[in-house]
Amino acid sequence: MTFQIPRGTQDILPNVVGKWQYIEKTAREICRLYQYQEIRTPIFEHTELFLRSVGQTTDVVQKEMYTFEDRKGRSLTLRPEGTAAAVRSFVENKMYAHPIQPVKLYYIGPMFRYERPQSGRFRQFVQFGVEALGSSDPAIDAEVIALAWDFYRSLGLKKLKLVINSLGDQESRTAHREALIQHFENRIGEFCTDCQTRFRQNPLRILDCKKDREHELMQSAPSIIDYLNEESKAYFQKVLSYLDDLGIEYEVDSNLVRGLDYYNHTAFEIMSNAEGFGAITTLCGGGRYNGLVEEMGGPNTPGIGFALSIERLLAALESEGVELPTSKGIDCYIVTLGEKAKDRSVAILKDLRDHGVSAEKDYENKKMKAQLKAADRLQAKYVIIIGENELEKGAANVKNMESGIQEEVQLNQLSTFIKERL
C-alpha cells in the first residue's frame, strides 16, 4: 500500500525550503524594524471563537472550516485565519493593560481552509500577519499598510497595486446596509443561493460574490463612500494623506469589501499586476476591526491588521522572475583515501563544524572520483583531501573549487585555514 499527500496540501522539500526560510527571515526583520513582536497561538481553537469573530455569514465559517469534536465532545476548529486567535490571546492575557500601547503583534504559521485547491492556494497554507491593537490613530492604518508594502518590496516584487476602501463606522454601515437592501430586494432571486442567504444577514457580503460579479446590479450597487458620515470621511482622508506622505500609490475601490465580518473603516488589498499571475490577483488583505476585542470579552480596543499567504507570495515571485538570494552549497567537503583517513575524518569534520564551517564527508566508501563528484553536487567551496601519505605528514591538501588552487595545510590548522578564507 502506498500513501499520498492529502489534496490541497504540499511537501516543502529541502531544495525549496531555503526560499521559505529567507521569506520568514525577511518578515521577522521587517517586523523588528516596525517594532512588532511575534505571537504563537494554538493551531486549533474552540469553534465558537471563529463563529463570533469571523462571522457566521462568511464563506470561511459556512463552507471552509475544518471542525471536529474532541473526546469530550467539545467542538474545535483548525484555525482558518490568525486575527481571531491573536485577539483572543490579547484579551485572555490582558495585553490591553500593558503600559505601551498599541500592542503590536505578528505571526507566521499554518492555517486551514477547505476550499478548491488552485495555483498558489492550498487547504493548508502559511500566513504571515500583523495586528496592531490599542490605537484609533489613522497613522497606524498607514503604518500597517506600509509594513506589508515594504515586505513585498524588500523581496523584489515590483508589479504591485494597493487597493483601499473605507467601510465606515457603525452609523455609516447601517445607512449603507439599508441602501443595499433596497437596491437588491426586487431582484435578489437572480443571484446565487449564497447571495440570497446573505441578503438579510449581511448584504454587504453580496458585493464580495465571485459568481455574480458581472451582474448589472453589482455594477450599479450603492457605494459605501456615498454613505460615510463626516467622521468616517475625515478618518479615511487622513489615512490616504498619510499614504501620500509615505509615497505609496493607491487606488480607491468603493466595491472592495473584505471576506470577514469584523472589518470596519479602512479595508485594503495588495494585488499583483504581474503578467500571467492568474485570475485571482490578491496577495494580501487587511483592515480595521474596531469592536472585535469587545466581542471577545475585552474592553473597547480598536485594532487593525493584515494577513498574507506565503504560497501566493512565492507564486508572485515566480511570475516576476525574482530569484531570492538563498544560500547555496557548503563550505567544504572531506575526501578520504583509505581506512585510516576515513577514521581520522570523523574528528576533523567535528572540528570544522565546531568552528562554524558547514562540512560534509563520504559515508558510502566511494572512490576518490565519486567523492569529488559528490563535493561538486553539494557546491562545496573547498575540498579537503586526506590519504595515508597526508596522514604521515600530519597534513591535508585543500583545494579551492573556484580557483583550482591547491595548498597543503596542517591537520590541526584546517578549521582556521578554511574559516579565514570563507
Image: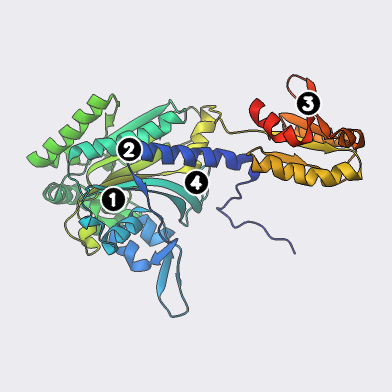
Q: Which residue is mark 1?
A: 205
Inspect the image, locate mark 3, and give the three-letter code of the amino acid beneath it: Lys
Instruction: Establish if 176 lies above or below 240.
Output: below
Instruction: State the count of labels.
Output: 4
Colour mapping = rainbow
| Residue at numbered disc 4 | 121
* Quarter occupied by the C terminus: top right
Q: Position of residue 398 (x, y in %)?
A: 78, 28
Secondary element at tag 4: loop
- Are the residues at dot 1 and dot 4 in contact (C-beta closer than 8 Å)? no
Circle 2 — which element? Answer: helix
Please rate how many residues cluster around mark 2, counting C-alpha atoms within 10 Å: few if below 14, some from 14 to 19, many from 20. Answer: some
Q: Earlier in the sequence, mark 4 or mark 3?
A: 4
Can residue 55 be spotted in the picture?
no
CA distance separating discs 4 and 2: 28 Å
User: Mark 1 and 2 residues: CB-CB less than 8 Å, in contact?
Assistant: no
Q: Toward the viewer: 291 or 120?
A: 291
Q: Amino acid at mark 1?
A: Arg
Report the Cα–Cα distance between label 1 and label 4: 22 Å
* Residue 295, x across and y down, in percent: 22, 61
Q: CA distance from mark 4 to mark 3?
A: 46 Å
The picture places residue 150, in percent across and down from the top left corner, at: 37, 31
C-alpha distance separating marks 1 and 2? 33 Å
Counting residues from the start of the chain, the first of labels 1 and 4 encountered is 4
Q: On the image, numbered disc 3 is attached to which residue?
A: 399
Determine which residue is flagged by label 2: 34
**Spatial separation of the CA atoms under disc 2 and disc 3:** 45 Å
Numbered disc in front, either 1 or 4: 4
Q: Is residue 32 left or right of residue 221?
A: right
Quarter of the rendering containing residue 379 = top right
Mark pair 1, 3: CA separation: 65 Å
